[in-house]
């Protein structure tokens, strides 16, 4: 049996026009084939999303509307090329890895496929996505209840996860699709290494975790890990929903009607509104 962290992987990351996967458009994408001693093979795309980007999104990735319009390929062409590349990865059985890949990236690509290509991502792949590794899901499971690093740096964002697992972080390169994709693959490997290290030989911060759930990542295949992530994501969503509905705990974020979708790695696309175009 090949344990999940020793597999060749395809690291995937997008930069987009806003943070809502249902409405966002792809601006850039990186797909990196590597892992287990393999020399990385990187493909990148820059797209013209065809709509104005949210200022907050531009602040994150630094790609302006003008730059994307001048240098980016047409959205339909870019989405088609990316979807084809992903379908080849899926057909080859190579796991897709990314940070929040099931919470955001794959749903973003699915909506873009529907918008420009007239089919779902799984329809284009001609197979369900059953070999996905989401480092945000793994990190929340293995090292729960981490506190925010600062007002601007959340407990499970890519930088925090990378630094937690001993990876050097370059803020000047960060938030580019290629950098973030590669860091997610490296973080996944580090998590796997810790899980497969004898308990007493693990880093001190891991031994201090309460609860310490790294053993849930040990001695399993990618397919088994995928199924576990479905449950972990559902549990996290249910817990967050309950927290939001608890006025004493949520305080200013209290929302008695909050609904957090726990489906992973793909959520059903919303029904298009009457007369909605691309």
Image (cartoon, rainbow, N blue to C red):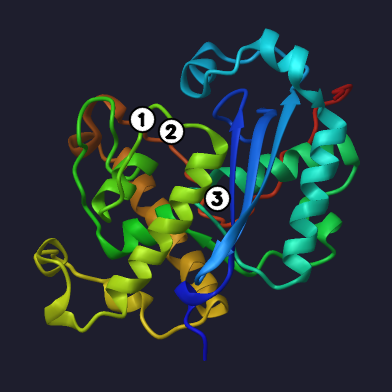
Circle 3: is it few (<14), some (14-19), or many (20+) Cα within 10 Å?
many
Real-space Cα separation, disc 3 to disc 2, in angstroms: 17 Å
Identify which residue is drawn at 46% across, 59% down.
234
Q: In the rendered image, is residue 45 in sight?
A: yes
Callouts 2 and 1 close, C-beta under 8 Å: yes
Q: Position of residue 192 (x, y in %)?
A: 37, 71
Q: Position of residue 41 (x, y in %)?
A: 64, 55
Which secondary structure lies at badge 1?
loop
Q: Is the residue 232 above or below the residue 76 in the image? A: below
Identify which residue is drawn at 56% across, 57% down.
264
Identify which residue is drawn at 27% across, 47% down.
163
Q: Quadrant of the C terminus?
A: top right
N-terminal label among 3 and 2: 3
Q: Position of residue 74 (x, y in %)?
A: 84, 25
Real-space Cα separation, disc 2 to disc 1, in angstroms: 5 Å
The residue labelled by disc 3 is 101
Circle 2: is it few (<14), some (14-19), or many (20+) Cα within 10 Å?
some
The residue labelled by disc 2 is 174
Q: Nearer the viewer, residue 116 or 270?
A: 116
The mark closer to the camera, 3 or 2, is: 2
Q: Position of residue 108 (x, y in %)?
A: 66, 40
Q: Is the residue 219 above or below the residue 120 in the image? A: below
Q: Nearer the viewer, residue 235 or 129?
A: 129
Asked whether, in this view, residue 217 is left or right of residue 131, the answer is: left
Asked whether, in this view, residue 72 is left or right of residue 153, the answer is: right
Q: Quadrant of residue 23?
A: top right
The residue labelled by disc 1 is 171
Residue lying at the far bottom in this picture: please name it: 1
Q: In the rendered image, is residue 99 in sight?
A: no
Asked whether, in this view, residue 135 is left or right of residue 223, the answer is: left
Which secondary structure lies at badge 3?
helix
């Amino acid at each position: 049996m090949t344990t999940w962290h020793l597999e060749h992987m395809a690291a995937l990351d997008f930069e987009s026009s806003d943070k809502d996967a249902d409405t966002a458009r792809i601006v850039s994408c990186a797909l990196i084939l590597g892992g287990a001693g393999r020399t990385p093979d990187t493909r990148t795309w820059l797209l013209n999303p065809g709509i104005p980007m949210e200022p907050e999104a531009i602040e994150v990735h630094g790609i302006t509307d003008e730059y994307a319009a001048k240098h980016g390929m047409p959205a339909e062409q870019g989405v088609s090329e990316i979807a084809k590349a992903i379908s080849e990865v899926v057909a080859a059985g190579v796991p897709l890895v990314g940070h929040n890949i099931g919470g955001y990236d794959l749903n973003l690509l699915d909506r873009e496929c529907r918008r420009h290509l007239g089919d779902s991502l799984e329809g284009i792949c001609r197979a369900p996505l059953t070999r996905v590794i989401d480092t945000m899901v793994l990190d929340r499971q293995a090292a729960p209840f981490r506190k925010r690093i600062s007002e601007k740096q959340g407990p499970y964002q890519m930088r925090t996860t990378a630094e937690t697992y001993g990876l050097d972080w370059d803020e000047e390169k960060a938030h580019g699709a290629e950098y973030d994709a590669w860091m997610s693959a490296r973080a996944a490997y580090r998590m796997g290494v810790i899980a497969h290290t004898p308990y007493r030989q693990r880093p001190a911060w891991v031994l201090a975790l309460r609860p310490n759930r790294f053993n849930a990542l040990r001695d399993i295949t990618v397919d088994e890990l995928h199924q576990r992530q479905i449950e972990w994501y559902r549990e996290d969503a249910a817990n967050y929903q309950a927290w939001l509905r608890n006025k004493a705990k949520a305080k200013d974020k209290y929302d008695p009607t909050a609904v957090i979708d726990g489906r992973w790695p793909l959520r059903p696309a919303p029904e298009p509104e009457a007369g909605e175009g691309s």
